[in-house]
Amino acid sequence: MAALKVSYSTLDQAFDALDDATSTFSTDSMPSDGGSFGADDVAQAFAAFRTAQQRSAAWLADTSRTLAQFAHDTKSQVADADLDLARKAGTTK
């Protein structure tokens, strides 16, 4: 019978990296133009780009948060399943 092998350290590393990414995407933002562009068309294009970048960053932060939670939950669920299997194996002897 093949055994399932789960690396808790890999799951922890994935969680940490994704948690860091969540923080990065949540806090980093593009600077405002501060009126330095002059032409309205350029300022409007910059504002549209900035809005799109903020939406993308929010999506990346949310996705990173979700994936970090998956890594955390996987570690917890595997540990619980392992403990449950160990208890069942102990009662059949």
Image (cartoon, rainbow, N blue to C red):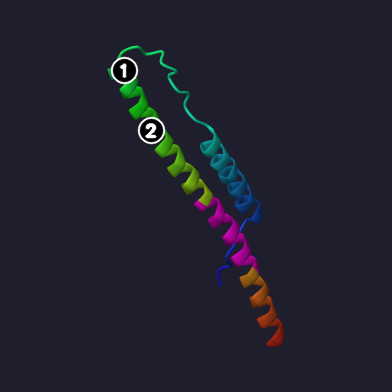
Q: Secondary structure at mark 2?
A: helix
Q: Position of residue 45 (x, y in %)?
A: 31, 23
Q: Position of residue 43 (x, y in %)?
A: 34, 19
Residue at 61 percent of width and 72 percent of height: 81
In this picture, is 28 found above or below 89? above
**Start-end of magenta stretch:** 66-79
The prevailing secondary structure element of the residues shown in magenta is helix
Q: Are marks 1 and 2 in contact (CB under 8 Å)?
A: no
**Quarter occupied by residue 42:** top left
In this picture, is 71 found above or below 40? below
Q: Which mark is residue 51?
A: 2
Q: Amino acid at mark 1?
A: Val
**Quarter occupied by residue 51:** top left
Crowding around mark 2 (Cα neighbors within 10 Å: few <14, some 14 to 19, many 20+) is few
Q: Which mark is residue 42?
A: 1
> Which quadrant: the C terminus?
bottom right
Left or right of 6 on screen, residue 30: left
